[in-house]
Image: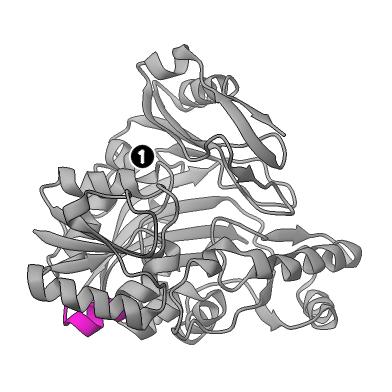
Amino acid sequence: MKLLAIEARQNATYYVSRYEQIVGLGADLYVLNGEGTDDFWRADRYRVAGSREVAELIAAAKEWHAEERFEGVLTFSESGVLAVAAVAEALGLPGIGVEAARASRNKLLMRQAHERGGAAHPSFRYVTDEAQALAAAEEFGYPVIVKPTLGAASNYVFRADDADELRARHAQAAEGLTELSWYAMEAGGLDLGPHGLLIESFLDGDEYLIEAVVWDDEVYLGSIVDRVTAEGDTFDDDVHHAPTALTPAQVTAVHEVVAAGARAQGLVRSVMHAEVRFHDGRPHLVEIAARPGGGGLDHMARISAGHDPIAAVADVARGVRPDVRHFTPTGVHTAAMCLLPPASGRVEEIHVPDRLVEHDGVFFFKLTARPGDLVRRPPEGNSILGFLGVTGTSFEDAMSTAEDLAGQVRADLR
């Protein structure tokens, strides 16, 4: 299979390991970056369009497609979903369609779709100033969530417990819109929908991360991972565990709300990363992204549930039904977490102990920050140092090992 991966603006080397997984599945993978470095991928399978404008990306993809005859176009980036949909449409290749991509990228359009489709979701309001934010919070009741419509990775997502906190968080999030890297990595010339802030009612229960596939209106929950982070007023997707603690009845309820959300967003054949949170005993949609989850969630899915989200991406991209089944946990305990810097600053050095590298239980370890990188912590951003995933004999064993090893990774910042 011959596939084309696209990033409108290269996100450092973040997706290289996933591109390598695609190659490991037997694919001949070509990479097109709108803006990117020269040495990013194998030279004879890599091109830089020289612009992140969608018209330039389409023109470069068409020229290359005429030479190579790609079977599909793919992305692993939240910022690439719309661009890939537009390129696939222009090349006459399988895709989710631009309208479904827009509804799966812009959080306001996603919420409106959920509302129309009857999928359980928090109350929401698009706001353009502080007064509107305060009025929405008064209507919903505190606490409330502030989030960008075109964000990702919890950047500039805050919880506000009262009006004073909301004023401060709204100002921080509004200022952050101008520096939001996920927005800056979008292709130019596309209608992305409103770029601004939402106020949402707070969902007070536990959160679950799901790797799923929709194929001709049948939704398959490939894996379910429990988010076990102790939360504050900012949100780091930093500690996860599988297999899930959900009961069979709760899994059924989660399946129903994810299926309703997928239909509402217009997703017919797609991989999905769904985030679901319980409220008053019922699952509600936080979001459904039309791409797999990041970090080590693909590894957790394979180990804890026998589901391969990366293989699903390759299959869906070329219009082939993935080898997927309804959620069936393997019983193997896994724990994974983001490695967080202690503060904002520029990385001088990251210290990784030999014990971590050599540990038999480590199934995933990846540093995403390098010396010289600027990392930002809330409220300026949600930068991380990397990811760590381990297996264990029980929930307690896996969590203890992950926390112990993660605590030994140290970053020197200035």
Q: Which residue is mark 1?
A: 300
Residue nearest the observer in this picture, 199 or 374: 374
Q: How many numbered badges does the structure rendering display?
A: 1
Q: Residues within 10 Å of mark 1 (few under 14, many from 20)?
A: many
The image quadrant of residue 54 is: bottom left
Does 401 appear above or below 264? above
Q: Residue at x 35, y 16 (%)?
A: 360
Q: Residue at x 41, y 58 (%)?
A: 10
Does 197 appear above or below 38? below
Q: Residue at x 44, y 83 (%)?
A: 190
Is 84 situated left or right of 135 in this image? left
Is 270 situated left or right of 159 in this image? left
Determine whether the residue tagged by mark 1 lies in a helix, strand or loop: helix
Residue 109 location in percent, x, y? 52, 82
Is residue 88 a member of the stretch shown in magenta? yes
Can residue 379 be seen at all in this image of the molecule?
yes
Residue 12 location in percent, x, y? 44, 50
The image quadrant of residue 46 is: bottom left
Is 139 situated left or right of 240 in this image? right
Is 209 situated left or right of 313 in this image? right
Residue nearest the observer in this picture, 48 or 182: 48
The N terminus: image quadrant: bottom left
Residue 266 location in percent, x, y? 35, 81
Is residue 28 a member of the stretch shown in magenta? no
Residue nearest the observer in this picture, 335 or 43: 43
Residue range in magenta is: 86-96
- Please name the amino acid that badge 1 sits on: Met
Can residue 285 be seen at all in this image of the molecule?
no
Residue 293 location in percent, x, y? 40, 53
The C terminus: image quadrant: top right
Q: Residue at x 62, y 54 (%)?
A: 205
